[in-house]
Amino acid sequence: MYGGYGFYYDWTYILVILGVIITMAASAKMNAAFSRYRQVPSSTGLTGRETAERILQANGIYDVEVRPVAGNLTDHYNPADRTVNLSEAVYNKTSVAAVGVAAHECGHAIQHHVGYVPLQLRSAIVPVVNVASSLSWPMILIGVILAGAGSLLGSSLISLGIVLFSAAVLFQLVTLPVEFNASARALKQLTGLGILPAREEKMARSVLSAAALTYVAAAAASLLQLLRLVILFGGNRRRD
């Protein structure tokens, strides 16, 4: 039965720990890259806001507003209200890092403008993923309790919980091409519009590459967690 499986003393926790290590390493690399190049001023002297506005206008996008947002590295593009939201370290800053991050968020705005399919898919599944993510673990835990009490319903709830968790993993995987493509578009804009010279473009590329690794790490950690669930509870099903 599920109840006979040790939740706190099984080898599959190695997968969770590995996921945490991967995520922390990627985050540290991102923070290091951003911290390094936020100290380097761009030769054009454009702020993150000015960079974003120039890129949007150059691509014929006039219905997207550039806004400041509180926090550190909280930059994002919101397709719902068509806004490029830039953090305090980006909005009014002239560093190479700030310019690169602002360009990346504009990359998402361009994706939205041209109907980039992976972005549309990601936006479409967000409501489903939000519900699935909030229900997956409660469903699994309730299933474990019921299975431990001998209820056949427990097995079904655990399986449903794993399926719901898989939706969150799918979202992480769909996010990868969206983020990589946004960075590619950003770098193209930075060089094509003369916002950054070649040497500074390489610095911005380093920042964006480090940022991309955080998404890869998040996807890897989610896959490892999913693998753990399949191994842990799949094995119990075979013993039932």
Image (spheres, grey):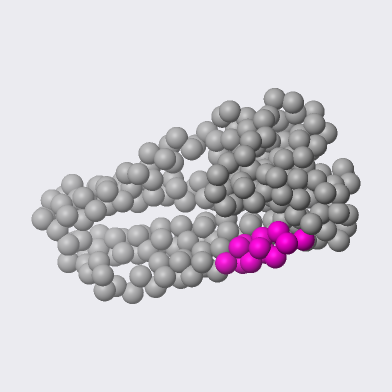
Q: Where is residue 5 in the image (x, y as percent from the top left)?
A: 21, 67
Report if residue 112 is visible in the image. no
Q: Where is residue 103 in the image (x, y as percent from the top left)?
A: 73, 45
Q: Number of labelled discs?
A: 0
Direction from residue 35 to residue 145 in the image, left or right: left
Seen at 61% across and 46% down, the residue is 87
Seen at 57% across and 67% down, the residue is 28
Direction from residue 12 to residue 44 in the image, left or right: right
Q: Where is residue 25 in the image (x, y as percent from the top left)?
A: 55, 69
Q: In which quarter of the image is residue 108?
A: top right
Above-or-below relation of 201 to 83: below
Q: In which quarter of the image is residue 20?
A: bottom left
Name the foreground residue: 226 vs 102.
Answer: 102
Q: Examine the structure image and report whether residue 123 is included in the region drawn in magenta.
A: no
The magenta stretch is 28-40
Name the foreground residue: 9 vs 77.
Answer: 77
Name the foreground residue: 8 vs 36.
Answer: 36
Direction from residue 51 to residue 229 in the image, left or right: left
Q: Where is residue 185 in the image (x, y as percent from the top left)?
A: 76, 45
Q: Residue furthest top?
A: 63
Quarter of the picture holding the C terminus: bottom left
Q: Examine the structure image and report whether residue 30 is included in the region drawn in magenta.
A: yes
Q: Quadrant of residue 76?
A: top right
Magenta stretch, overall SS: helix
Name the foreground residue: 151 vs 129.
Answer: 129
Seen at 44% across and 63% down, the residue is 224
Quarter of the picture holding the N terminus: bottom left
Report if residue 5 is visible in the image. yes
